[in-house]
Image: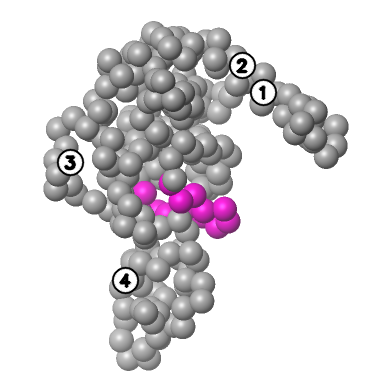
Amino acid sequence: MDQAAPPDPASARLLKVSLANTLAAAILMPYGAFQTLAEQSGYDMDRLCARFGVSFEQAAHRLTTLSRPTARGVPFFFIRVDRAGNVSKRYASSAFPFARFGGGCPRWRLHDAFGSPGRVLTQIVETPDGQRWFTLARTVPRQGTHDHDLAVGLGCELKHAHRLIHAKGLNLDAPEVTGIGPACRLCDRHPCPQRAEPPQGRPLTVDDWAKSVSPYPFVIS
């Protein structure tokens, strides 16, 4: 706490709560037992939740912490959003390119999860840098309610997907891939019918006599 040097008492209390939550997760889901079952079960979320008596969100969050050098798990990233796309939590033990500002990408099935409450949706996505990721998405209830008004996304680099039971049955050698971006303002994918904003720093090429797939056609370098 002292080394973190929170700037004010409120920040110090928030940090204390965060550290207490981390400790609670470590007690509920001891590293060795959790990592062992994760590997043995193929990272089966249902089995992990049942064995340790935790929620989908808690188990997913714990998976992002399995980075002990002598017992590493799959390096996952984690994100939680509401129906409007606001990000309320995100963690990563991998290099997934989270957007710091703006909304998420509507092509990612994370946002489709609200249409199938409680169901795990899988998708292989490709970010603009060419990196491919295997992702899971599922709705979860907000604390203190039973309404599934939050969605959790969990993912890893595609090269690790063969270790996951949730990827069973998918052709990982020649997968069906969906291109996504961090946010429309930061994404150079063209054409994209889902584009909601023009990309930053790209001149638009609007044609008075033709309608394009994207409402914001732009110059491709």
Q: Position of residue 198 (x, y in %)?
A: 47, 72
Q: Which residue is mark 1?
A: 19
Q: Which residue is mark 2?
A: 23
C-beta proximity under 8 Å, tags 3 and 1: no
The answer to which of 6 and 100 lies nearer the viewer is 6
The Cα atoms of the two marked residues, 4 and 2, are separated by 46 Å
Residue at the far right: name it.
Answer: 9
**What amino acid is labelled 3 in the image?**
Leu
The Cα atoms of the two marked residues, 3 and 2, are separated by 36 Å
Q: Earlier in the sequence, mark 4 or mark 2?
A: 2
Q: Which mark is residue 130?
A: none
Dot 1: few (<14), some (14–19), or many (≥20) neighbours within 10 Å? few
User: Which quadrant would residue 87 be assigned to in this image?
Assistant: top right
Q: Which mark is residue 191?
A: 4
Dot 3: few (<14), some (14–19), or many (≥20) neighbours within 10 Å? some
Q: Which residue is mark 3?
A: 172
* Label 1 element class: helix
**What amino acid is labelled 1 in the image?**
Leu
Dot 4: few (<14), some (14–19), or many (≥20) neighbours within 10 Å? some
C-beta proximity under 8 Å, tags 3 and 2: no
Question: From which residue to which does the magenta span run?
Answer: 96-108
C-beta proximity under 8 Å, tags 2 and 1: yes
Q: Earlier in the sequence, mark 3 or mark 2?
A: 2
Q: Earlier in the sequence, mark 3 or mark 1?
A: 1
User: Which quadrant would residue 94 be assigned to in this image?
Assistant: top left
In front of the other: label 4 or label 2? 2
Mainly helix, strand or loop, the magenta region?
loop
Q: From this view, report whether residue 68 is shown above or below residue 135.
A: above
